[in-house]
Amino acid sequence: MENLPGTDLVRAAAFIGAGSAMGPCAIGPGVGEGYTGGKACEAIGRNPDKAGLLRRSMLVEPLLAFVV
């Protein structure tokens, strides 16, 4: 099979398109996890006696989000 002259250009465009699609999609989970962490810190500040439960919930929630 002959090597088509535009094959490299099409391949490069596919890689650029995939990279530009993955970049903005990574912003949402980062913002969501930061929001969760901030709210957990606020809750610990309001209820210091529940810190262990809140910290555990704060650490387990992102793991479940990655698994699902």
Image (cartoon, rainbow, N blue to C red):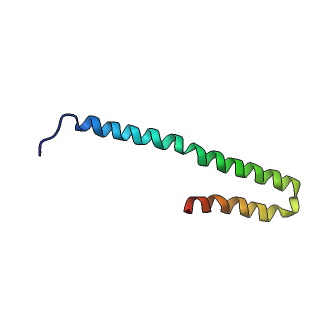
Where 44 sits versus 28, above or below? Answer: below
* Residue 29 in picture, x, y percent from top left: 60, 49
In this image, 46 relative to 40: left or right?
A: right
**Picture residue at 25% right of the left edge, 37% below the top:** 8
Quadrant location, the C terminus: bottom right
Most extreme residue toward the left, as rendered? 1
* Residue 17 figure quarter: top left
Nearer to us in this view, 21 or 51: 21
* Residue 33 in picture, x, y percent from top left: 66, 50
In this image, 5 relative to 46: left or right?
A: left
Nearer to us in this view, 42 or 6: 6
**Picture residue at 53% right of the left edge, 44% below the top:** 25
* Residue 5 in picture, x, y percent from top left: 18, 34
**Picture residue at 85% right of the left edge, 53% below the top:** 45
* Residue 37 in picture, x, y percent from top left: 72, 51
Q: Count all numbered tags in the image, as a single digit.
A: 0
Where 27 sits versus 54, above or below? Answer: above
**Picture residue at 58% right of the left edge, 43% below the top:** 27
